[in-house]
Amino acid sequence: MSKHNYTVLESNSSQEILLELRDNNLWIGQDDLSLKLNWTLKPEGLCKEEICVPVKQPTLLSSDSQINLMQFAQELNRPLTLELNKNVVFLGESAYDRSVALYSQQAPEITLPDLDGNLHNLSEHFGKKLCLVVHASW
Amino acid sequence: MPVWQKIYSELSNYNFTVFSVMEDKNIDDARPWIEGANAEFPCTIDTKHIVSDLYNMFNVPTIVWIDESGKIVRPNDVVVMNESGAKLVKVDPEEYIQKIRNWVINDSSPVSSKDEFIKLKNQRTPADKEQLARAEFALGQWLFDNKEISLAGNHFERATELSPADIMIQRGTMSMRGMDPMKDYGPIAGEIIQKGFKLYRPIRD
């Protein structure tokens, strides 16, 4: 079975990672999982910094030194979608994480450019009452 | 947008500001709106729909009120400042602006209910399917940017099937699917309404 370079996209990043397509699943090396996606498989579960999520289906998740990337997404309830014609994977944000963040009522940080390319942070304006207005030309 | 500049001019002395985000694929589509508004507050462009993902927004315009501590006190609300739009969403712009004035100047409650549970109920949270739709949208956009127009179209289609009432996706991808977001939106909006979805969900106080 051969490994290929895939473009792995997340909301804020794009990385080239060596993945193996096997049994209709994509497998990532445990090293790359830690180094590139910042998650590590430990006896207590899938861990990122001090947070660990217990694994529901350990036999589906890992095999030798590899992690099944699709099962990894399922374990974290993150949407994963792929286009095999272009070797590209998008790993989205879970509805659960988004819901927890919104229920905390803390306004999520926004960093975006204006027409001249200057970046603006929403949090720069905290301390004032603020209306965030989202619209489009269409 | 010009109306928001008027509100800003009136209320900026009361420790109030506006942060504008346009969710447009092409900066040049947003440009005339921003340049025409001559706004004194930040006018940003979100070509990747980062904000609608973070805040769980489904259509434009969407307004979020945030207090001095950075807390969302009136989530995902709707007001359209022109007459036809106001009729469509059934929110009176003048009353809405008065509500902002009362909040900013008199520190009145941003929502009529003081009940924390009711306040949270106004905050919609996403379903798994809706987040999968946003992932399909993001992948489609990457493919489009890499000149894979037809592959991108497949993922945009899938996104619209997963989350039909996500107008950010439905209408925001039209220019990338060979459609016109002005001319071709009407029939699609009709279908969405027929399926029982709402296009706008203003907070009814």
Image (cartoon, rainbow, N blue to C red):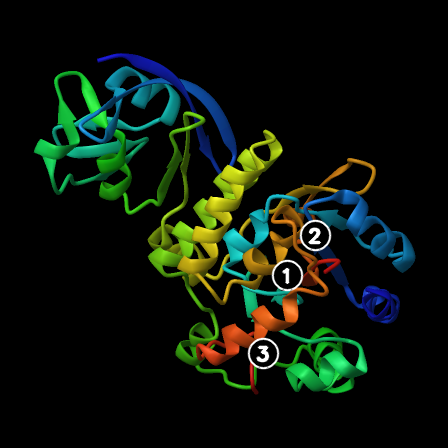
Q: Residues within 10 Å of mark 2 (few under 14, many from 20)?
A: some
Q: At numbered mark 3, what does the secondary structure look like: helix, strand or loop?
A: loop
Vertical side of B7 occupied by B112: above or below: below
Q: Quadrant of residue A49?
A: top left
Question: Residues under labels 3 and 2: Cα distance?
Answer: 25 Å
- In this view, the residue in front, B73 or B127, is B127
Callouts 1 and 2 in the same chain: no
Kindly identify the amino acid type of the residue bearing the numbered disc 2.
His
Q: Which residue is mark 1?
A: B68
Q: Residue at x 51, y 52 (%)?
A: B54
Q: Relative to A97, is B87 on the left or the right? A: right
Label 1: chain? B
Looking at the rendered image, the disc whose residue lies closer to the viewer, 3 or 1, is: 3
Q: Which residue is mark 2?
A: A125
Q: Position of residue B171 (x, y in %)?
A: 61, 59
Residue A80 numbered mark, or none: none
Q: Which residue is mark 3?
A: B202
Callouts 3 and 2 in the same chain: no
Question: Residues under labels 1 and 2: Cα distance?
Answer: 8 Å
Vertical side of A69 occupied by B39: above or below: below
Question: In the rendered view of the protein, which quadrant contains the C terminus of chain B?
Answer: bottom right
Q: Residue at x 66, y 87 (%)?
A: B90
Kindly identify the amino acid type of the residue bearing the numbered disc 1.
Glu
User: Marks 1 and 2: CB-CB under 8 Å?
Assistant: no
Label 2: chain? A
Say whether disc 3 or disc 1 marks the residue closer to the N-terminus.
1
Question: Residues under labels 3 and 1: Cα distance?
Answer: 23 Å
